[in-house]
Amino acid sequence: MKPSRIKLAVTKITHWEYWPFEVVYFPVVLYYFWLSLKARSFFFFSASNPSIETGGMMGESKFDILKNIPQEVKAVTLFFPKGTSFTEILESVYGSNISYPLIAKPDVGERGTAVEKIDNEKELKHYLDSNKNDLLIQEYVDFEIELGIFYYRFPDKKSGTISSVVQKEFLKVTGNGQSSIGELMTKYPRAGFQFKRLNSKLNFDVVPDKNETIVLEPIGNHCRGTTFLNANDIIDSELIKVFDSISNQIPGFYFGRYDLRCKSIEALKEGKNIKILELNGAGSEPAHIYHPGASIFDAWKELFFHWKVLYQISIENHKRGIPYMSFKDARAGYKKIKQQ
């Protein structure tokens, strides 16, 4: 009982969202070199968000960014430096407002690497034994809707723009009353790509009831099977006003994507029942480009546009006295990522 290799191979070839990063980004890299020549710095992006290390392109601390976000709209998050004992971590977790399930993740990392939903103390111990870097423990926010909202604002403006909204649909299968979870996964390429990884985490022999939905992966990352849906239709003046208010309270932030959960779109536009999980800076993508069936040419158009905006904001901040990072700083940021 395994997914058809031929079927998965055909899906990879015919759906660009599964193409290698290097292939998708090749024309974007060429454009980046052109912008670097214009800026006279390969690291111009570091000036985009002066309060975020490297501007948020690489090696930045998630916790340092979260500290600047208004308390009322962010998920409760605890930071533990490398080497913190299990006992100390348990005491801090039990002394906070965090309960199981909870989210554990590295403080430095990207694309969902080593992010896990933890259901009990035993699982937390196992996670800590396997992950020895600086760590974040975050409350699990069970709001139904998870979004990625891309916001940017030019340094001389009080109001910005929301250029992308992606809604995340978690990897799941729906039972027919006869097939096991494993069998259902083999019929669905998006799940098939995750078959080997999830085999050790799920009981593939369980047969869900008819119309029963089984969430296979609770972490909302594309590389872990989440479907990214274009939700740009919710962008309006109300939504922009909410994120203008939040963003203007974050010193030195001008360009990036909020990853959050909310109870409803209506509540979101009222600034209520929002929990920001992460804020990503210069390295952010307008993730709606991964909507199934979207054109690669439309994706390139969006990526080029956002890199142009990143360049313009960085140049403006540089004129205001914000320095570009050095090769030494860039190497240090790269090393942080590799260490993870």
Image (cartoon, grey):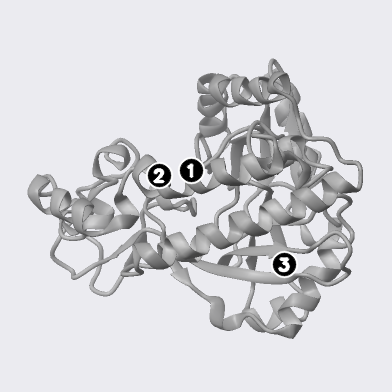
- Reading the image, the residue beneath label 2 is 26
Where residue 217 appears, as percent x and y from the top left, is: 41, 51
**Mark before the other along the chain sequence, 3 or 1:** 1
Secondary structure beneath disc 2? helix
Q: Residue at x 8, y 49 (%)?
A: 6
Q: Quadrant of the C terminus?
A: top right
Residue 312 higher or lower than 204, as above or below? below
Distance Cα–Cα, label 1 vs label 2: 5 Å
Give the mark toward the camera: 3 or 1: 1
In the image, taking residue 195 as reference, residue 321 lies left or right, namely right
Where residue 253 appears, as percent x and y from the top left, is: 81, 52
Residue 29, disc:
1
> Do the numbered discs 1 and 2 sit on residues whose CB atoms are within 8 Å?
yes
Residue 201 higher or lower than 292, as above or below? above
Secondary structure beneath disc 1? helix
In the image, taking residue 66 as reference, residue 290 lies left or right, namely left
Distance Cα–Cα, label 2 vs label 3: 36 Å
